Amino acid sequence: MVKLPLPDDQILYSLRMRASREQSHISGAERLIYSDRLHEEMENLLNRAIGHSIGNADEVHFTIEAIKGDILYCDSLPVSTIVTTDTKNSSEKARELLSLIGIPEASIRRAFDDISEGASPDGGNMRGAMLIDIDSGNRIEPDPFRGIRVSRIDFEEAAERNLESEMIRICVRGSRVKEALALATKVILAGTIAELCWSDNPDYTTGYVASKKYGYVRFPKLKQEGDRKGGRAFFLRKSEIGIENYISFLQKRAVLITKLSPGFKPSSLREFLESYEN
Ligand code: AMP
């Protein structure tokens, strides 16, 4: 991790957007943006909030804060895609990968069950992620309705440009990967053992498992089309992590991705594991 100086005369801002309808979460975004692109990026996020496929928001909140503390600079996780046949097969392969990473069966089951049933105690989606202690299999996030929202993470402009050509090279389409990859990179940098995610957007069915060892591994069709349930689970060892510092790092520390780690072209889980070991 290298520390670079800020470009001349530029302030780095944390830009956060949260959109809801009838108090139910619709969409959100977390960006780190230099002053010269702040207006443009706010407009993009506003368009996203009021034109979301779940429906138009009736409340949109923007928070803009200048970053004052140190910024951490890092490389992204590598992106790979596992070719699967259907939702059942995707789910089996994602569980298999989590198991190889060392996540116990009870914790894997807890994450899949809770996300697919609605991870908030009211049966809805959470705004943030659940934390699962892999030694007990219990959820330990302080607020199970809200979860932990990761913030202050983004790509530097040059890395963002490279991301587009890297996505073409590894046959990945769509803009969603960009934000999720940034988030997962910070989540793993924080000391999380693995992350499981699928979107709450009914049209977006690809989910992923992220880890230090295997990077950001996508599983198409991880949920059925039309399903509005989605969420994130961060697997960790409570006994090995200072939970307050961990949460504070995820929420507050500014992390900018300066370089992309090269990923792999779509393949079966077996082929992916073989190429990873070589
Ligand atoms: P999305 O991929 O944006 O559809 O988000 C899927 C789920 O991940 C949401 O329902 C939230 O539970 C969770 N989530 C979204 N954004 C964040 C974030 N910044 N930090 C932690 N969890 C998030």
Image: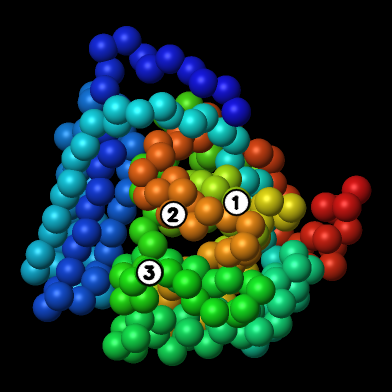
Is 44 left or right of 135, judged from the image as shown?
left
Q: What residue appears at the point 66 percent right and 74 percent down from the top-left corner?
A: 135
Q: What residue appears at the point 54 percent right and 48 percent down from the top-left corner?
A: 190
Residue that carries the numbered disc 1 in the rendered image = 191
Which comes before the other along the chain, label 3 or label 2?
A: 3
| Alpha carbon separation for disc pair 3 and 1 | 18 Å
**Quarter where residue 162 is shown:** top right
Is 121 left or right of 26, judged from the image as shown?
right
Q: Is residue 245 visible?
A: yes
Three-letter amino acid code of the residue under disc 2: Glu
Is 195 left or right of 199, judged from the image as shown?
right
Residue that carries the numbered disc 2 in the rendered image = 244
Return the mark for residue 101. none
- The x, y position of residue 215, in whole percent, is 67, 52
Is 126 left or right of 250, judged from the image as shown?
left
Q: What residue appears at the point 46 percent right and 34 percent down from the top-left corner?
A: 256
Q: What residue appears at the point 25 percent right and 70 percent down from the top-left corner?
A: 26
Residue that carries the numbered disc 3 in the rendered image = 142
Which comes before the other along the chain, label 2 or label 1?
A: 1
Which comes before the other along the chain, label 3 or label 1?
A: 3
Mark 3: secondary structure: loop
* 167 and 116: which is toward the camera: 116
**Quarter where residue 69 is shown:** top left
Q: Mark 1: give few (<14), some (14-19) or many (20+) Cα within 10 Å.
A: some
| Alpha carbon separation for disc pair 2 and 1 | 13 Å
